[in-house]
Image (tube, rainbow, N blue to C red):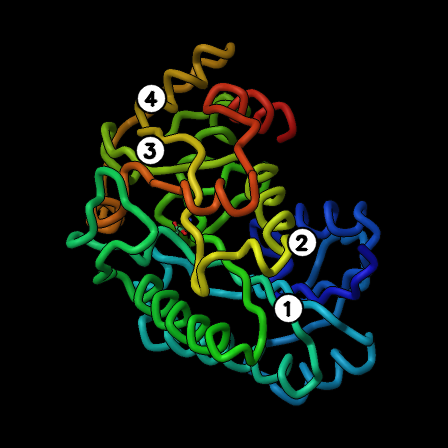
Amino acid sequence: MNNRILITGALGQLGEFFINSLTKAGNYILATDIKKPNNISCDFEFYDILDLEKGNELIKKYKINQVYNFAAILSAKGENNPMSTWYINNSGFMNIIKLCIDNNIKKVFWPSTIAVFGKNSNLDFVNNEEPMFPETMYGVSKLSCEKAMFYFNSKKIIDIRSIRFPGIVSSTKPGGGTTDYIVDMLFSAKNNENYNCFLNSETFLPMMHIDDAIEASIMLMNADKKNISINYPYNISSFETSPSKWNNIINSIGYDLNVKYKPDYRQKIADSWPKKIDDSILRNDIKWEPKFNDIDTAKHIIDSI
Ligand code: SER
C-alpha cells in the first residue's frame, strides 16, 4: 500500500492493532497521542488534535498522505463532561479535516459508533438509516460529525470513510465506554478475580473481535470509490451478547469467573443502544464478513492477554 499514515489517539484501544496491521501491509505509521507510550513499534509524537499548528507541522515533517483519526472521548466518560466531549470530538474532527484539506490529504478513516442510535431507532435491528436521537454527548458528537462527513463527501471535498463500531473485544482495555465490560471480564477471568458488572445480566449489545474491525476498516479504506454506495458511515455487525451470556462463554472455555451485577448510570446508556445491527450495505459494498464468532473471540483474546 505504501501510504504515510498519521494515527491520532494511537494509545487508545484500537491504535496498537491498527499500527501492526497497517505496518505489515507496507505503510509508514506516525502514532500520536496526548499520553506517553510505554513501548511502541513506530514513530511517535505528542499531539493534541485541538492543536492545529502542531498538526500542520507533523503532517509536513512526516509527509503524511492519510489519516486514521481515533482521538475521542467515549460514551460513559463523556457523560461526566459533556462540554469537553463535544469540544474534543467535534473540534478535533473538524481540525483533522481542515488539516487534510490544507495539506492535500485525500483520504481519512474516522470511526463512528453504535452510540449514534437512540430509543427512537428500531433497536431490535437497526438499519443504516434509522432515525437517530442519541442520548449521550458521545453519540451526539459522533452523529454531528457524521453529518459533516456527509457534507464533505457529497461535495467531494475530501474522501472520509467510516464504520459505526460496536463494542470492540481486544487484549487492551478500552476505558470510558459502556461496552467496556466485554474486555474487563476477560481480564478478571484470566486473573482469577471476581467481576462487578455495571450492566444488568441480560443487556444485549453488539460486539466484535478487534481483528474483524481492523480488517473491515482497511478493506473499506482500500475499496474502489465506485463501490462505496453511501456518503456517511456504514453499520457493521458481528455478534451480540449479554454479560451473563459472555460469562457462560468464558466459563465454557475453562475459566471460573464469578460475576455480580451492580448496574449504574451506564445501564441507561446501554438501554438506548442497538441489540442487533443490519450491516448488509457494508457487506455488499466491500464483500466483508467477520471471521470470529463469540466463542472464538473470547478464546482468542483471553489467550493473548
Ligand atoms: N465502545 C463504545 C462505548 O462504549 C461504543 O462505541 O462508548
Residue type for callout 2: Asn
Q: Secondary structure at mark 4?
A: helix
Q: Quadrant of residue 2?
A: bottom right
Residue at the (68%, 63%) spot, across then down = 36
Looking at the image, which residue sits at the far front?
226
285 is higher (above) or lower (below) than 89: above
In front: label 4 or label 1: 1
Q: Quadrant of the N terminus?
A: bottom right
Q: Are marks 2 and 3 in contact (CB under 8 Å)?
A: no
Residue type for callout 4: Lys
Quickly name the residue at label 1: 107
Among numbered discs 2 and 3, the one appearing first in the sequence: 3
Task: Report crowding for label 4: few under 14, some 14 to 19, many 20 or more residues within 10 A (C-alpha).
Answer: some
Does the image show residue 265?
no
In whole angstroms, how far apart are the C-alphas of marks 2 and 3? Answer: 41 Å
Relative side of 212 to 73, left or right: right
In whole angstroms, how far apart are the C-alphas of marks 3 and 4? Answer: 15 Å
In front: label 3 or label 4: 4
Q: Quadrant of residue 221?
A: bottom right
In front: label 2 or label 3: 2
Q: Secondary structure at mark 2?
A: helix
141 is higher (above) or lower (below) than 186: below
Relative side of 304 to 85, left or right: right
In whole angstroms, how far apart are the C-alphas of marks 2 and 1? Answer: 10 Å
For residue 84, which numbered disc appears in the image? none
160 is higher (above) or lower (below) than 126: below
Quickly name the residue at label 3: 196
Among numbered discs 2 and 1, the one appearing first in the sequence: 1
Quickly name the residue at label 4: 245
